[in-house]
Amino acid sequence: MLTRLYLHPDQDFTVTDLAADARIPLSTAHRELQRLVDAGLVLARRVGRTSLHRANTGHRAAAALTELLQVSFGPAVVIAEEFADVDGVAEVVLFGSWAARHAGVDGPEPADVDVLVVGTPRRADVYAAADRAQRRLHFPVNPVVRSIDQWSSSDADALVAQVRHSPHVTLLDRPREAAAPVEATR
């Protein structure tokens, strides 16, 4: 529940949302949320009969807790896990607003994660991995695929040039032989 709250600090969540996401009984979620509210880590407010909860980003432990949750359960971890077994992948690179915030560039909370997949994977496998990551992260994961040659030559591709010259995070970096065309390895 803390991961969902603190990695989406601008959103409100119902107890039902958080219980379903954590796959725990509603009564357990309610009890644990009340403990978090009592500790000051979570803010609660009522809208009619609904109780809405959000991370208390003003709490003195908020920054440290967010960082801990980010490195344990955040986009970099989830995307690395979901793309690790995709055949034909040489590199996986996060770019865009998420990578910029990760690098300390000021701006609004990212609404999605942009993923550059380098190699020769099957597109269906890339989109399946992105869908799994999206379900876990609760926000869009936008993959794009570039060949090793395209990634090596930033002059030929405007997106590659943009990624190379802006904040980005390399999650997976395998030997080029690992990214042999999928058809040749099956």
Image: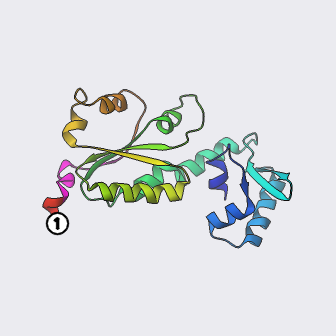
> Residue 162: x, y in percent?
36, 28
| Residue at screen point 50% across, 35% down | 97
105 in relation to 64, above or below: above
18 in relation to 177, above or below: below
The image's colour scheme reads rainbow
> Residue 126: x, y in percent?
34, 55
> Residue 64: x, y in percent?
65, 44
Q: How many marks?
A: 1
Quarter of the image with the C terminus is: bottom left
Quarter of the image with the N terminus is: bottom right
Pick out the residue farthest to the front.
Answer: 48
> Residue 96: x, y in percent?
45, 35
SS at badge 1: loop
Lateral position of residue 62 relative to residue 100, left or right: right
Residue at the spot of label 1 = 186
In the picture, residue 21 is in which quadrant? bottom right
**Start and end of the magenta stretch?**
171-182
In the picture, residue 51 is in which quadrant? bottom right
Q: Nearer the viewer, residue 21 or 58?
A: 21
| Residue at screen point 73% across, 66% down | 29
| Residue at screen point 17% across, 52% down | 177
Lateral position of residue 105 relative to residue 150, left or right: right
| Residue at screen point 33% across, 32% down | 159
For label 1, count other residues whose C-alpha is less than 10 Å away and answer few (under 14), some (14-19) or many (20+). Answer: few
The kind of residue tagged 1 is: Arg
Q: Does the magenta stretch include residue 176?
A: yes
